[in-house]
Image (cartoon, rainbow, N blue to C red):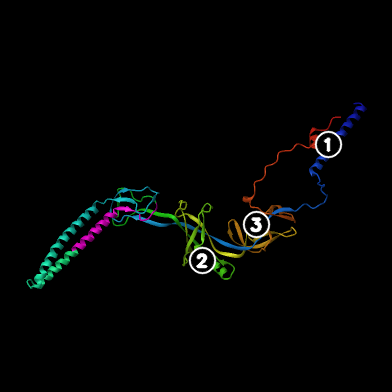
Amino acid sequence: MTAFQGAVERHRCVRAAGFVVGSIAAALLGACGPGTPPPTPGAAPPPVEVGVVTVARGTVGLVTELPGRTEASRVAQVRARVAGIVQAQSFREGSDVAAGQTLFQIDAAPYRASLASAQATLARAEANLMQAQALAERYKPLAEARAVSQQEYVAAQAGQKQAQADVAAANAAIQTAQINLGYATVTTPIAGRIGRALVTEGALVGQGEATQLALVQQINPMYVNFTQPVADVLRLRAAIAAGKLKTVAGVESAQVRIVLDDGSVYPLPGKLLFSDLSVDPGTGQITLRAEVPNPKGILLPGMFVRAQLEQAAAGDALLLPQQAVLRTSQGDSVKVIAADGSASTRPVKIGAGKNGQWVVLDGLKDGELVVAEGFQKMQGKTRFKPVPWVPAGARPPAPAAPAASAASPAASAAASGPAKP
């Protein structure tokens, strides 16, 4: 390579390097945007945004969640009241039955025969009564005329009364026979849902005992029996007496919400029927009962559920999202943002939960800002910018990303590479 060719090659490299440096500078200035001054070296970073909720005190109902089980509101054990062979079953297992519907048919032939025998006995007793009555009527004028002795007249009257008693006994025997004949047709006393049949056709039932044939349960409405520790009841009453809590109007008919075993809330509310006056000596629990409508048969007898009952109200409390409260073994606390943007940890007293929120009884003042979102951003930071926290379910959908714009001249020039000399 000659000296002249080397000088030309060096000149080409210097021009290419200068073009690249100019392109990078133009891209950096374009990133700052029009009117945006370049960052000042050594300036403090902007405060970190955290989602906060504003404290507002008020009357908050305290909901107690208690374990319980469902129970049919009415239960009928269908039993055989007469002895005999089951001839027919007239229902489908697991179906709904109406009150008075025939379920089983027991062989009624012996009871029809007993009814016929009682009717014959009544006819004989009525014939004897007719004869005894006629004799007593004939003896009456004769006794007055002293044509017969007084003893014969008294015997005729006694025969008439005995015949009347025989007729009454025959009528009672007919009623008994009719009742037994009716018992041969087994019906349900209540409307409800029937379970499986406990006997089959051809089985001998009622021989010496009232054999159970089936079970009918009325499941609309449904009862929910749940228990509460007596210590909690006494603590609640003491708080109400001290003025810390208020009684709920109509607590004896308060609404009860049912939480199913899978965590879902049953859509129809129930009402509290009663609270037992006695305490179970074995468990120290008080039994309560609620009535819940069950038109679709979702609740079944024997299901494990949890009952949410509002028994009292805190007059000077507030609600916070559960995620805003830090719960540790040392106690419960929240992060509070001050007016100057600084954060501090505040211990609080937590009550019961309600609709995914904690009831805070003490530790906060009206108007304070409590952090509900952005805890991970607070590590190592001292200043924060509070923004209103919006629950995830209430946030609007994120806008779609805009289409890519045309490349800037500087970027295009950088992508095309250095110009040839």
x and y percentages locating residue 117 in the rendered image: 20, 56
Could you tell me the amino acid type at mark 3?
Answer: Ala
- Residue 324: image tag: 3
Distance from disc 1 to disc 2, alpha carbons, whole Å, reads: 82 Å
The question of residue 196 being in magenta is answered with no
Disc 3 to disc 2, how far (Cα)? 32 Å
Query: Is there a contact, CB below 8 Å, between mark 1 and mark 2?
Result: no
Disc 2 element = helix
Q: Which residue is mark 1?
A: 20
Calculate the distance from the C-alpha at mark 1 to the C-alpha at mark 3: 51 Å
Which comes before the other along the chain, label 3 or label 2?
A: 2
Q: Earlier in the sequence, mark 1 or mark 2?
A: 1
In front: 309, or 348?
309
In this rendering, the label closer to the viewer, 1 or 2: 1
Of all residues, the one furthest to the top in this rendering is 1
Q: Main secondary structure of the magenta part?
A: helix
Local SS, label 1: helix
Callout 1 environment at 10 Å: few (<14), some (14 to 19), or many (20+)?
some
**Vertical order, 391 against 405 (above or below):** below
Question: Which is nearer the N-term, disc 1 or disc 3?
Answer: 1
Question: In the rendered image, is residue 288 in sight?
Answer: no
Residue identified by numbered label 2: 230
Residue 370: assigned label: none
Range of residues picked out in magenta:
166-193
Q: Residues within 10 Å of mark 3 (few under 14, many from 20)?
A: many
Task: Answer with left or right where residue 77 lies relative to residue 118.
Answer: right
State the residue at coordinates (37%, 52%): 98
Residue occupying the point 14% across, 62% down: 130
Q: Three-letter amino acid code at disc 1?
A: Val
